[in-house]
Amino acid sequence: MSSHQHIQIEKIIELSDEYRSFVLDRHFDTLPGQFCMVWIPGFDEKPFSFSDSNELTVKKVGPFTEELFNISKKNHLQIRGPYGSSFPNNTRTVVGGGCGIAPLKFVVNKYLEIKNIILGGKNKSDLLFLDFFENEIGSELTTFTEDGSHGLKGIVTDIDYFGKPNYAVCGPEKMIQAVGNKINLPNKTFVSLERYMKCAVGLCGACSMSGYRVCVDGPVLRYDLIKDSSHFGKLHRVKSGELKSLDYLCD
Ligand SMILES: Cc1cc2nc3c(=O)[nH]c(=O)nc-3n(C[C@H](O)[C@H](O)[C@H](O)COP(=O)(O)OP(=O)(O)OC[C@H]3O[C@@H](n4cnc5c(N)ncnc54)[C@H](O)[C@@H]3O)c2cc1C
Ligand code: FES
């Protein structure tokens, strides 16, 4: 297991009450879709995707992320990684919802051939990095909000997907499932999954899901490999190892 690096926070960007980006003082040798483990000594360690090679974007949902929100620019972060698989560099269409939009910013920034960007959220403030995506020349942006506060009123499955694979899909798992099924090109659709993680290097089994260890085989997996798995869209393992119904994850 690689050791932690002490990383200085260069800037903290408040995207909304719930979302914050931490700009780090150095770039990691990482690809879009990969993640790192952030350790708060004496507290816990949790996985976060890169929203750029020097940036993490966090949604405040519980004790660890609340503690992260208390961290100021003067502090360091203890980070190990990058870990896991990445989205393929011939991705053409990205589809994201909620905090799943964060790693897709990195996809769009790094892979220059993106043709379509499709984003969804409950309201406009869920559409992370809207200014960034609106300024992406050469890509068509379509946004959906459930309350109609930006773009089309509805959800990302309300449009027809045709002809622009490969697809990168990231967001709540039930959204991933609905989008993956609608696209219906399972071997050209790559999805990013979240599972509870401890070691992040394939040793402990905490993140196991129907024969895959999400930390090393994923988090980005081809949709045909997992779409019929008994856990996908239904179950996830909690800290104790017990399987529970999946009614959230990257909401
Ligand atoms: C590979 C990978 C990449 C990830 N990347 C990111 C990222 O870029 N940004 C990010 O913010 N998070 C990301 N996560 C999720 C992040 O690790 C969890 O949000 C974090 O563990 C929450 O810790 P906590 O102690 O604050 O809340 P917890 O105590 O773990 O959760 C508190 C409650 O919030 C709910 N909850 C937990 N996680 C989420 C969630 N993601 N969305 C909504 N509700 C949730 C649950 O109901 C839970 O009971 C990633 C997870 C994985 C596996
Ligand atoms: S977190 Fe330990 S095997 Fe994946």
Image (cartoon, rainbow, N blue to C red):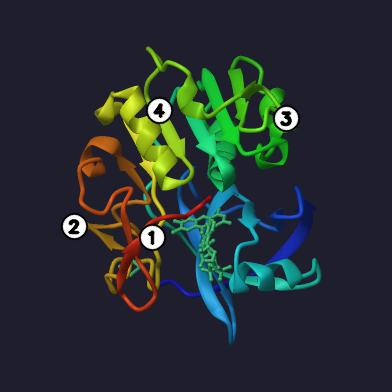
How far is the residue under mark 2 from the one under mark 3? 41 Å
Q: Is mark 2 within 8 Å of ligand 2?
A: no
- Disc 3 crowd, CA 10 A, few/some/many (<14, 14-19, 20+): some
Say above or below: 55 vs 168: below
Give the Cα distance between marks 1 and 2. Answer: 13 Å
Q: CA distance from mark 4 to mark 3?
A: 26 Å
Q: Residue at x 58, y 87 (%)?
A: 42
Report, in whole angstroms, how far the alpha carbon at label 2 lies from the one at label 4: 23 Å
Residue that badge 2 annotates: 211
Earlier along the polypeptide chain: callout 4 or callout 3? 3
Find residue 233 and report its horizontal and vertical position in percent.
33, 48
Q: Earlier in the sequence, mark 1 or mark 4?
A: 4
**In the image, is the residue at mark 1 within 8 Å of ligand 1 by its beta carbon?**
yes
Quadrant of residue 120 within the rendered picture: top right
Residues at circles 2 and 4 in contact by the CB criterion of under 8 Å: no
Q: Which residue is mark 3?
A: 149
